[in-house]
């Protein structure tokens, strides 16, 4: 089977032009086909650990530690964020990278609301969102694709 | 399973078990997903597609297929149009940083996990993907793929499979 596998440049000739000789760097990107932002620190086959409707933690393939996160339902969350900012008489700038924390906070509010009735579930959500917040603290992302989707 | 016979000449297209009605269907991989992965230099993610989904043809022989993500997608209830193919491969694949012209290499599968691939038959999405595959016929689109934690009691299915999806549409007997 391996002999029949092709290189990344043969498999994705157009996409491969985006590939750089540089090594992987941690970054947050919007995946439009699934409407989520994915932040990943290591280029490994991560294991998704679903926290709830809006957050998934990404675990190392063999160690129990988070190496990234997914914020899901971004079109919905981004609209909520825009409404919050508009209510303060401000607008999102078009040409600036946004802190990932801003959309994570909205996801946390929406996600925690659904788990408020169960004490054990609330504890689990709180711990997971704390892990996500620690990772997202200094991360920024380009909101242009997300703005188009919204 | 004869993988050679199942493999499409176009790497972006794979044969998959249809989520409904049992027949097979050709799925095209979403161009925006592979582009974003390439732009992020996610060689493990691209390797998983070429090695597992295309090379091993795992979508034709899934363990189970679920429908619906139980979360907002594009602000509405479009999540019901997403099908989740579950597989339990024993290996994974990745490309090498230094070798964009080399095939992916086999790596160990992550522990305690299953491999899930998200696909849709929604016409607008399929039309969008088909436009990037001139002359090809596809009936669906692959939106994304990843390893996910396995359920502790049923290790060939995703953790919390009973509630994380809307419904089970097919399971291998």
Image (tube, coloured by chain):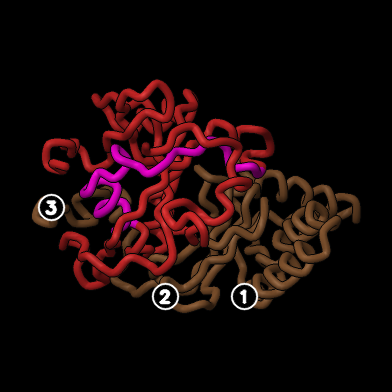
Chain colours: A brown, B red
Q: Are dots 3 and 1 on a single chain?
A: yes
Whole-percent x and y of residue B60? 29, 37
Question: How many residues crowd around disc 2 within 10 Å: few (fewer than 14), some, or many (20 or more)?
Answer: some
- Give the numbered dot on residue A1: 3
Q: Which residue is mark 2?
A: A62
**Residue matched to label 1:** A135
Alpha carbon of mark 2 to alpha carbon of mark 3: how far? Answer: 26 Å
As for residue B118 lying within the magenta part, the answer is no
Residue situated in front as seen by the camera: B113 or A139: B113
Q: Is residue A140 left or right of residue A45?
A: right
- The crowding category of the residue bearing disc 1, from other C-alpha atoms within 10 Å (few below 14, some 14 to 19, many at least 20), is some
Magenta-colored stretch includes residue B67: yes
Q: Are circles 3 and 1 on residues that touch, CB within 8 Å?
A: no
* Horizontal arrangement in the rendering, residue A55 relative to residue B103 (left or right): right
| Residue B169 spot, x, y in % from top left | 49, 32
Residue A17 seen by the camera = no
Q: Report the span colored magenta.
A: B46-71
Camera-side residue: B63 or B6? B63
CA distance for labels 3 and 1 = 39 Å
Say which residue appears at 34% left-offset and 64% top-offset. Answer: B44
| Residue A89 x, y percent position in the rendering | 90, 53
Secondary structure under badge 3?
Answer: loop
Q: Quadrant of residue B78?
A: top right
The CA distance from mark 2 to mark 1 is: 19 Å
Looking at marks 2 and 1 on the same chain, the residue that comes earlier in the sequence is marked by 2
């Amino acid at each position: 089977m391996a002999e029949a596998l092709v290189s990344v440049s043969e498999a994705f000739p157009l996409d491969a032009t985006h590939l750089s000789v540089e090594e992987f760097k941690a970054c947050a990107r919007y995946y439009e086909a699934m409407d989520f932002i994915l932040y990943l620190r290591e280029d490994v086959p991560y294991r998704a650990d679903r926290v709830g409707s809006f957050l998934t933690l990404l675990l190392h393939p063999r160690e129990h530690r988070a190496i990234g996160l997914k914020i899901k339902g971004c079109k919905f969350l981004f609209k909520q964020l825009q409404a919050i900012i508009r209510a303060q008489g401000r607008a999102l700038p078009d040409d600036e990278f946004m802190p990932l924390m801003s959309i994570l906070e909205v996801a946390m509010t929406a996600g925690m609301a659904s788990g408020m009735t169960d004490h054990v579930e609330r504890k689990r959500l709180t711990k997971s969102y704390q892990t996500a917040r620690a990772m997202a603290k200094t991360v920024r992302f380009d909101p242009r694709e997300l703005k188009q989707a919204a | 399973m004869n993988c050679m016979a199942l493999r499409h000449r176009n790497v972006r297209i794979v044969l998959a078990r249809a989520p409904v009605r049992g027949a097979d269907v050709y799925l095209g991989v979403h161009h925006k997903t592979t582009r974003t992965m390439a732009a992020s230099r996610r060689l493990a993610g691209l390797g998983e597609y070429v090695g597992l989904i295309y090379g091993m043809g795992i979508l034709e022989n899934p363990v189970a297929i679920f429908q619906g993500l139980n979360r907002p997608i594009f602000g509405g209830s479009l999540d019901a149009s997403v099908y989740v193919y579950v597989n339990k491969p024993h290996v994974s694949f990745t490309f090498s940083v230094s070798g964009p012209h080399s095939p992916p290499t086999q790596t160990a599968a992550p522990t305690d996990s299953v491999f899930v691939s998200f696909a849709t038959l929604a016409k607008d999405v399929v039309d969008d993907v088909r436009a990037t595959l001139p002359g090809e016929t596809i009936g669906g689109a692959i939106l994304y793929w990843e390893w996910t934690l396995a359920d502790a009691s049923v290790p060939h299915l995703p953790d919390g499979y009973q509630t994380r999806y809307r419904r089970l549409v097919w399971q291998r007997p």
